[in-house]
Amino acid sequence: MENISHEGIIIKSTGGLYTVEKDDGTSEECRAKGAFRHSKITPLAGDRVTFECADGKEGFITKIRERKNSLIRPAVANVDLLCVVIASRNPDPDLFILDKLCAVAKNNGIEVLIIVNKDDIGDSEEIFEVYEKAGFMVVPMCATDPDGYEKSIETIRNLARNKISFFTGASGVGKSSVLNVVYPELCLETGEISKKIRRGKHTTRVTTLFKMGEDTYVGDTPGFSSFDVVGFSMLDSEVLLSCFPDIEKHALDCKYKKCTHICEDGCNVMKALANGEISPSRHESYKQLFNELKEVKPWDN
Ligand SMILES: Nc1nc2c(ncn2[C@@H]2O[C@H](COP(=O)(O)OP(=O)(O)O)[C@@H](O)[C@H]2O)c(=O)[nH]1
Ligand SMILES: [Mg+2]
Ligand SMILES: [Zn+2]
């Protein structure tokens, strides 16, 4: 029988098996064609692909459409929006990891929304001050008691509409809980139950996108340890400054030609830091990343 060619988007990837959803909403299980295994490209959740499929048989992906971007962890492509969830407490926010995620998103042309969850048990004032000053969108949330957070829920829904969005953040911050509040039809596992499931499945890395309307897809990620974030995506030292727009803004007016903007006397960034226009934690993250990237030799990539 003749194979018929279809187009669709990969909504699930599990160790070599892909679920591809067609425009009509139905989906097919596919494998990647042998040719991909020899090239460096592996299909990812979020990829728009062409696949061939005979009736009732497993299909195979023949073509991956050009990507807008791709991330290493989570392993996804064509991400429009990254919803970075942090908890006001338990676990305590790690601003360096948050800044790194924001920088990687910026580097990949991905919009960022910071969701500060667990508003009921901690103080998130400082986070709002730092990140609103730096030009980010930040919303508060209490996923276990969302009464009074309707505005935040609306903001997330509106921002995610007609996009591919991923919720990311450290384990236990409440990613799945927030997703359940924003999209009650999802019913994702949270807390201890999700931990147990994860332990059982640790050998296969599953990435799933949920369709939440016409062109709206959202993905939950299992969370990461700080080690995992290192592999999130490579940042290039040449573009680091452009990944911190709040710092770059002041660097553009720096009078020194060859300035690192991390310690020089008379540097315009150092001035902005001293007079409070740049938050110390943002500058500290910039400095730390600058030093990390400086040590990456070209042949490490
Ligand atoms: N106090 C409080 N606990 C929360 C909140 N949101 C989630 N939790 C709890 O935090 C734990 C981890 O939530 P989960 O959604 O599984 O986190 P994930 O690992 O980021 O997906 C669960 O026990 C939730 O009930 C919140 O806003 N306030
Ligand atoms: Mg979860
Ligand atoms: Zn400078």
Image (cartoon, rainbow, N blue to C red):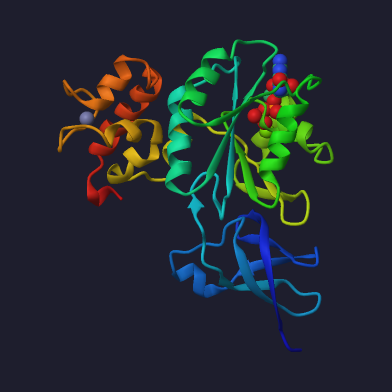
Q: Is residue 181 visible?
A: yes
Tell me the quarter of the picture where residue 265 sits.
Answer: top left
From the top left corner, tell me how far across and down residue 79 is, in percent. 57, 50
From the top left corner, tell me how far across and down residue 116 is, in percent. 62, 23
Which residue corresponds to the image point at 30% horizontal and 15% vertical from the top-left? 274
Above/below status of 103 relative to 31: above
Q: Residue furthest right?
A: 185
Q: Quadrant of ligand 1?
A: top right
From the top left corner, tell me how far across and down residue 270 is, in percent. 26, 22
Exactly how many numbered labels are in the figure?
Answer: 0
Horizontal placement of 300 versus 246: left or right?
left
**Residue nearest the observer in this picture, 29 or 145:** 145
**Residue nearest the observer in this picture, 85 or 192:** 85
Tell me the quarter of the picture where residue 124 sits.
Answer: top right
From the top left corner, tell me how far across and down residue 70 is, in percent. 50, 53
Q: Residue furthest bottom?
A: 1
Quadrant of the frame with the N terminus: bottom right
Q: Is residue 232 visible?
A: no
Which residue corresponds to the image point at 72% horizontal and 20% vertical from the top-left? 142
Which residue corresponds to the image point at 28% horizontal and 42% vertical from the top-left? 237
Which residue corresponds to the image point at 33% horizontal and 15% vertical from the top-left? 275
